[in-house]
Image (tube, grey):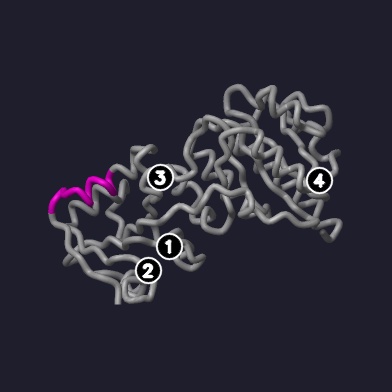
Amino acid sequence: MPRLHRITTRNARFQQWQALLTNRTKRQRAGEFLVQGVRPITLAVGAGWPTTALLYAEGRRLSDWARELLDSPAPGERIAMAPELLAELSERTEGDAELVAVVRMPPDDLDRIPVGPAFLGVLFDRPTSPGNIGTLIRSADAFGADGLIVTGHAADVYDPKSVRASTGSLFSLPAVRVPSPRQVDDWLSAHDITVVGTDEHGETALFDADLTGPVLLLVGNETTGLSTTWRNRCDRTVHIPMQGSASSLNAANAATTALYEAARQRHLTGR
């Protein structure tokens, strides 16, 4: 049976968990992040992501889901917290979270991303919005991608905004942070993957590009697009034909459109 503890004051452990919400450096140093919500926590536990603690409000009536999870063999301490302290960690605008899970980060290893004959992956170059990262993780999961790579000086995959925006897909789709293109180059050299950059001035319309083979879609920074370094690594670039007065799409929306087109082509060819 997991160990049960109580926390009723803003002690050192509470402050450590609170820092995971706002301090990327401390999050990385601890190798942990916070997860909220029934679906994300259920997926995290079901996918075998190690939980170091499950936090719940002491004295509050819990749902059957929460009680079953607390009584389950899922790893980690069970922490009964003063309700007002758990509310501070829950960051919810409507009501407090019933449970908050403290979850360990997996290693940032590109080998976590499986590569097969029908590989489909996405690389997000220097994203500034954690919400866009989470949204792209959700889209990549929905359209059958094998993984997401986040490169350069970028927002954090494990920022609470990213975790929430992924709606649990973070625990189904490998998302790997890579500081420099060199590591991706080494990974690509071991696989036969076509690198396709998305750009409003891309040479080929998206629906005219063959996306049925092993493909890594490149998505640029929300403001400046793909860097020269990544643009030079593309085997081809594609643009999304648009009407109306909009000149471009939000980066996550553009990537979602490209992922949908790749999934559509693969469905038609039976891949």
Q: Are marks 1 and 3 in contact (CB under 8 Å)?
A: no
Three-letter code for the amino acid on which mark 3 is drawn? Pro
Three-letter code for the amino acid on which mark 1 is drawn? Pro
Mark drawn on residue 50: 1
Q: Which residue is mark 3?
A: 160
Near mark 1 (Cα within 10 A), the count class, few <14, some 14-19 or many ≥20, is some
Indicate the quadrant where residue 104 lies: bottom left
Q: Please report the residue visible at 37 percent of the width from the left and 51 percent of the height from the top.
A: 34
Q: Nearer the viewer, mark 1 or mark 3?
A: 1
Mark 3: which secondary structure? Answer: helix
Q: Tell which circle, 3 or 2, labels the residue nearer the N-terminal end.
A: 2
Q: Which one is in front, 243 or 20? A: 20
Q: Tell which circle, 2 or 1, labels the residue nearer the N-terminal end.
A: 1
- Label count reads 4
Q: Which residue is mark 2?
A: 75
Q: Tell which circle, 1 or 3, labels the residue nearer the N-terminal end.
A: 1
Mark 2: which secondary structure? Answer: loop
- The magenta span reads 9-18
Q: Which residue is mark 4?
A: 211
Using the numbered discs, state the Cα–Cα distance from disc 3 to disc 2 in whole angstroms. 22 Å
Residue most extreme to the left? 9
